Image: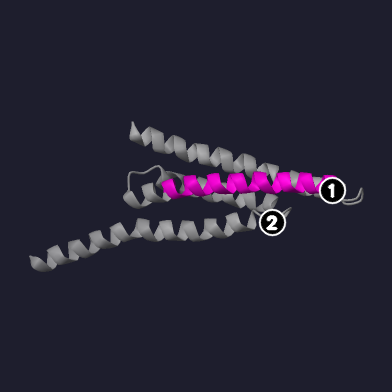
Amino acid sequence: MQDATGALDSILADINELPKQKSAEFTKKMSFLLSFSLLPVVNVGVIFTIIAMIREYLPALGSHNGAYIELKQAHIMKYQTYFYVHIALALISVIASFFCGAAAQPVLLGVAGTYIPPVAVLYAKGKQLRGLQQSKDQ
C-alpha cells in the first residue's frame, strides 16, 4: 500500500513540476525575443514570433495554476516595461533625426518607424494578459 502511495506522490510531484518547467522555458525564450525586439528592423520580424509564443501559451496563461499565474503577472510587467522602452527608442530616433544631416534623417525616421509595430503588439498582448487576469479574479 505504501508503494502505491509513494508512486502516486511521485506522479503528483512530476505533474506539479511540469508547469514550473514550462514557465521557465517560456520566460527564457520570451526574454531572448524581447531583447532582440530592441534592435531596429529585426524587431519587426521578432514580434511575429512573440505573437506566436503568446498564442501557444495562452491556455496555460489562462489557467489557475500558481506557476502560470506568477508567469502571467511577471510578463504583464515585462511587456509594459518593453512597451515604454520601445516608445523611448522611437522618440530618441525622431529627436536625433532633427539634429542629424539631411542624409541621415530618413534613415533615423525609418528606424523610429520600426519601433511602432512592437509598441502596438506589446500593448495589445499586455492588455490581453491583464484581461485574463481580471476574468480569473472575478
Residue at the spot x=35%, y=59% of the render? 18
Q: Nearer the viewer, residue 29 or 86?
A: 86
| Mark number displayed over residue 99 | 1
**Residue 137: x, y in percent?**
34, 35
Residue at the spot x=25%, y=61% of the render? 13
Q: Nearer the viewer, residue 41 or 111?
A: 111
Q: Nearer the viewer, mark 2 or mark 1?
A: 1
Report if residue 60 is visible in the image.
yes
Residue at the spot x=13%, y=63% of the render? 5
Q: Secondary structure at mark 2?
A: loop
Residue at the spot x=92%, y=48% of the render? 102
Within 10 Å of the Cα at label 1, are there few (<14), some (14-19), or many (20+) other Cα atoms?
few
Task: Assess whether residue 93 is covered by the magenta stretch.
Answer: yes
The CA distance from mark 2 to mark 1 is 21 Å
Q: Amino acid at mark 1?
A: Phe
In which quadrant is the C terminus drawn? top left
